[in-house]
């Protein structure tokens, strides 16, 4: 069940550690863009010896090697995303949920012609999600 995460680490010549595998699996199964703290609190249940520093260092490395991506949409914390494919994010200011938005930036092609190497494009949308809007009604 860790096969695909093992492959991801090996492709980047990264050392395979049980913590890295657990973190990748957690992020893959929880596409809610969790924080280090959320990952830590959840993984700790089955790994009592796990330290928050290990989780912190692991996500930093995974992010650095483009295995996962980091999102700073809320402005005061880093959220992590298993999905490295280009996509954008919507933050609901009512419930705090971060939702994946699959739209293409219209400026993207112009930007790609500017000779700079663009590795990431982030669009952050903020507002009220449809679930919260329905509740308000
Ligand atoms: Zn909401
Ligand atoms: Zn996402």
Image: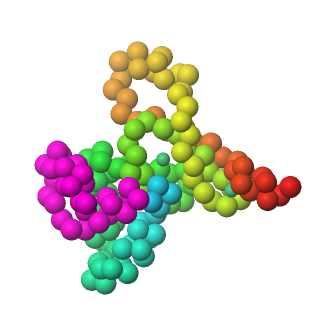
Q: What secondary structure is the stretch in magenta mostly built from?
A: helix
Q: Does 75 sit left or right of 31 as displayed?
A: right
Quarter residue 27 falls in: bottom left
Residues drawn in magenta: 1-29
Quarter residue 100 falls in: top right
Residue 110's place in the image compared with 119, above or below, is above
| Residue 71, horizontal then vertical, whole percent | 47, 50
Quarter residue 74 falls in: bottom right
Residue drawn at the location 16% of the way across and 53% of the way down: 14
Instruction: Pick whichever, 45 or 112, lies toward us.
Output: 45
Q: Residue furthest right?
A: 137
Quarter placement of the C terminus: bottom right
Residue drawn at the location 36% of the way across and 23% of the way down: 116
Ligand 1: image quarter: bottom right
Protein image colouring: rainbow
| Residue 42, horizontal then vertical, whole percent | 41, 74
Task: Judge whether residue 20 is colored magenta.
Answer: yes
Residue drawn at the location 25% of the way across and 60% of the way down: 1
Instruction: Pick whichever, 117 or 17, lies toward us.
Output: 17
| Residue 67, horizontal then vertical, whole percent | 30, 48
Say whether residue 83 is visible. yes
Instruction: Pick whichever, 69 or 53, lies toward us.
Output: 69
Say whether residue 79 is visible. no
Residue 121's place in the image compared with 58, above or below, is above
Residue 132's place in the image compared with 43, above or below, is above
């Amino acid at each position: 069940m860790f096969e695909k995460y093992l492959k991801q680490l090996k492709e980047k010549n990264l050392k395979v550690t049980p913590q890295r595998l657990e973190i990748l699996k957690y992020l893959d199964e929880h596409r809610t863009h969790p924080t280090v703290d959320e990952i830590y609190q959840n993984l700790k249940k089955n790994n009592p010896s796990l330290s928050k520093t290990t989780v912190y260092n692991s996500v930093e490395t995974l992010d650095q090697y483009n295995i996962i991506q980091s999102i700073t949409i809320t402005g005061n914390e880093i959220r992590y995303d298993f999905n490295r494919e280009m996509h954008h994010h919507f933050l609901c200011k009512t419930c705090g949920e971060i939702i994946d938005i699959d739209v293409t930036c219209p400026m993207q092609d112009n930007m790609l012609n500017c000779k700079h190497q663009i590795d990431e494009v982030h669009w952050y949308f903020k507002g009220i999600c449809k679930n919260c809007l329905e509740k308000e009604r």
